[in-house]
Image (cartoon, helix red, strand yellow):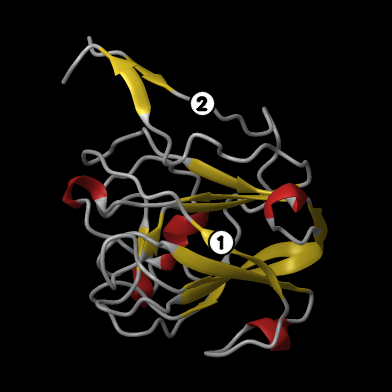
Amino acid sequence: ACTFTLAILWAAAAGAQNLALNAPVIDGSGAWNTNAATVFPATAGTPDNAQGYGLVRVTDGNLTDTSQVSFWLGRQNDPTEYFVIDLGSSVNVQSLGLINTHNGSNNDRGTRDFQVRGSNSLADITGVTSSAPVILSSQLTATQGSNGDTMLFTDIFNANNGFDTGNYQYLRFESQSGSYNANVGLNEIQAFSTVGSANIAGGKPVVDGSGA
């Protein structure tokens, strides 16, 4: 069995309720190998999920990176994709968890630069462009692994590292660049009413191990 040691470990809020779990995706730019989605809220049967990489994957609670099962991929060669989730009512959000994808064993798609907008107004946050305020602008940890790999980083953002906490019903994720190329995606978006801790292991070196 292979063992390894990380230079620094990370922790999120243990046992915190994910307010975004199974939240409907009510708007978005589309998904890989399909045109822009035309039916919302996105579910397993709507057009954006025809190839299994649809928007419904970002709130399904499946945190593995299993192809066509657990992550969303944006449209081909378009780094500026987006989606909007509905938390059901205006809730206090103190931290966000974002889990990047690496497209299963392909290790060729994922998001680098991104921003998140938050609002309680449906009109402000939906559509190709949004006037809702930006509440987070940052980068995601790039990951690699095999198909179904469970070793995925959760990047946690709170008031200490750029997240504008507040009461929001709608959250809009906007990718701005890819981890590897112009193709983007995301495994999961999470929202918590607790602060949580930032992922301080992302990108840190492995300083010891048994081999590979």
Separation of marks 2 and 1 at Cα, in angstroms: 20 Å
In-image side of 110 versus 200 (left or right)? left
Frontmost residue, 22 versus 106: 106
The crowd level at tag 2 (other Cα within 10 Å; few <14, some 14-19, many 20+) is few
Residue 138, numbered circle: 1
The image shows residue 37 at horizontal and vertical percentages of 40, 81
Q: Secondary structure at mark 1?
A: strand
Residue 51 percent across, percent down from the top left: 25, 66
Q: Which residue is mark 2?
A: 8
Q: Is residue 182 left or right of residue 169?
A: left
- Mark 2 residue type: Ile
Residue 121 place in picture, x, y as percent: 77, 81
Instruction: Decide if residue 24 is on the left or right side of residue 176.
Output: right
Which secondary structure lies at badge 2?
Answer: loop
Q: Is residue 144 left or right of residue 141?
A: left
The image quarter containing residue 170 is bottom right
**Circles 2 and 1: CB distance less than 8 Å?**
no
Question: Residue at 18% of width from left, 45% of height from top?
Answer: 105
Q: Residue at x 29, y 36 (%)?
A: 149
x%, y% of residue 79? 36, 76
Question: In which image quadrant can residue 125 be found?
Answer: bottom right
Quadrant (top left, top right, bottom left, bottom right) of the C terminus: top left
Tag 1: amino acid: Ser
Q: Is residue 189 above or below residue 113?
A: above
- Picture disc at residue 7: none
User: At 49% across and 75% down in the image, what residue appears?
Assistant: 82
Q: In the rendered view, would you say 43 is above or below 144?
A: below
Quadrant location of the N terminus in the rendered image: top left
